[in-house]
Image (tube, grey):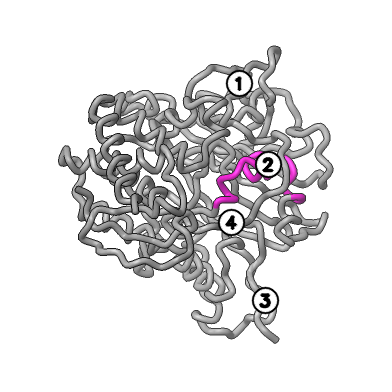
Amino acid sequence: MTARFRIGDVVRIRRAFPPGHVRTPYFTRGMSGVVDSVVGSFHNPEDLAYGRYNDATLPLYRVRFKQADLWPDYDGPARDTTIVDIYENWLEPAEGEQQ
Amino acid sequence: MDCVGINGVRRVHDMGGLDAGPIDREEPEHARWEKRIDAIRALCSKRKLMRTDELRRTTEDLGPGLYDALSYHERRCAAITNMLLQKSLFTVDELGRKMAEVERRWAKAGKP
Amino acid sequence: MTGPDTHTHAHDHGDHDHDHDHARTFQPDIEDSPFSHYQVMAEALGELLIDKGVITADELRSQLEWLDARSPADGAKLIARAWTDPDFKARLLKDVNAAAESVGLSAGDIPIRAVENTPKVHNVIVCTLCSCYPRGLLGLPPDWYKSREYRSRTVREPRAVLAEFGTVVGDDVEVRVHDSTADLRYLVLPMQPKGSEGMDAAALEALVTRDCMIGVSLPRSPRA
């Protein structure tokens, strides 16, 4: 499967809040970050969790966020980051945003 | 707990960024039953009876009350048991009878 | 009938020694502490699975023994080797599982990635959603790693969390938190402590603590 995003792309995590098993943490929803690496293709945990063991896979990315963007009251240096592993179905492009 | 309207509901296990107190760094030895749960979980995985993702889901689905009231291993025990019930590896009746049998056996052994 | 499981003298069994015949069914010390609902459930679960032929008592015992034997020693071996062998370090950073196998260790089936501390970057690992951890190399995670407090605060205030572990990182160093939410697990490759140059493998391994591979601490310093 071809990965939609590349290292360095600015991406936004979809602002959606379904109940059910999701591996995209709440604190990242609606946030934008930079693709740090393209890990490979894996089964979707949202399928596996409900017993849907099929062959479908999707790309997994490591997305790097600035702490200052994630937490309005972050009191550490501006250089601090958090990297989160996020599946492609949760990412959309964030064109025009500066990082 | 941060579960509010406009931004949607944060599920109880999804706790990154919430306020919390100091970290208790004590490392007590785990009880025999806790290790047993870990072993059962590993064996069920090997037998392909449950995927990691399914176990995570059933753990999360314990919900806000139980998730925090139970310890890590109690949650695991509950989640594994619920999962195996769902998959009909045994019935509620079988489990109930076995649990009662274990309790009787242990209570008996404790009598002077 | 349960098989002869490993019996540990855990804190909830009181602190007296007692004889136990491993061939008999396990009996907890009722007079010291009542058994809990989940303790009963765990026992029943194992017995049911054995009754139904899903697992055997021997398998359960072997698995318990295997779990008891897990430790961070294998992780420490990889770190110590990376400190002295630049080629190995490069291979470790590329693919931990393959690098481990190349030196006769098994990191397990789940892919583990090493993240390197440098003078500019300090890494720390967390799993906010559950308790994903590189068990194949570090063994079982400590209770604090699985706690609400660690899982909630590490992404939000990593420096305060590090300070609780006695670790201070300068403002000129990036603190980089890795939330292992997916299929990878992470292992911190700390910097080699000053003064440890020329030490042999065993001595170097002794400097590598579990906590420094999680990232909440630095490796031990060599004695002067």
Q: Are marks 1 and 2 on the same chain?
A: no
To the question of a shared chain for discs 1 and 3, the answer is no
Badge 4 amino acid: Ile
Q: Within the image, what quadrant is residue C168 found in?
A: bottom right
Question: Do discs 4 and 1 share a chain?
Answer: no
Q: Label 2 amino acid? A: Val
Between residue C140 and residue B80, name the one nearer to us: B80
Mark 3 and mark 2 lie on one chain; the one further toward the N terminus is 2
Residue displayed at 35% across by 38% down: C41
For numbered disc 4, what is the local secondary structure?
A: helix
Packing grade of label 3 (10 A; few <14, some 14-19, many >=20) is some
User: Residue B10 lies in what quarter of the image?
Assistant: top right
Q: Quadrant of the N terminus of chain A?
A: top left
Local packing at callout 2 (Cα closer than 10 Å; few below 14, some 14-19, many 20+) is many
Whether C158 is among the magenta residues is yes
Task: Give the label on residue A14, or none.
Answer: 1
C-alpha span from label 4 to label 2: 14 Å
Q: Position of residue B70 (x, y in %)?
A: 52, 36
Query: What residue is shown with label 3?
Result: C221
For this view, does B2 lie left or right of residue C13?
right
Q: Is residue C81 above or below residue B54?
A: below
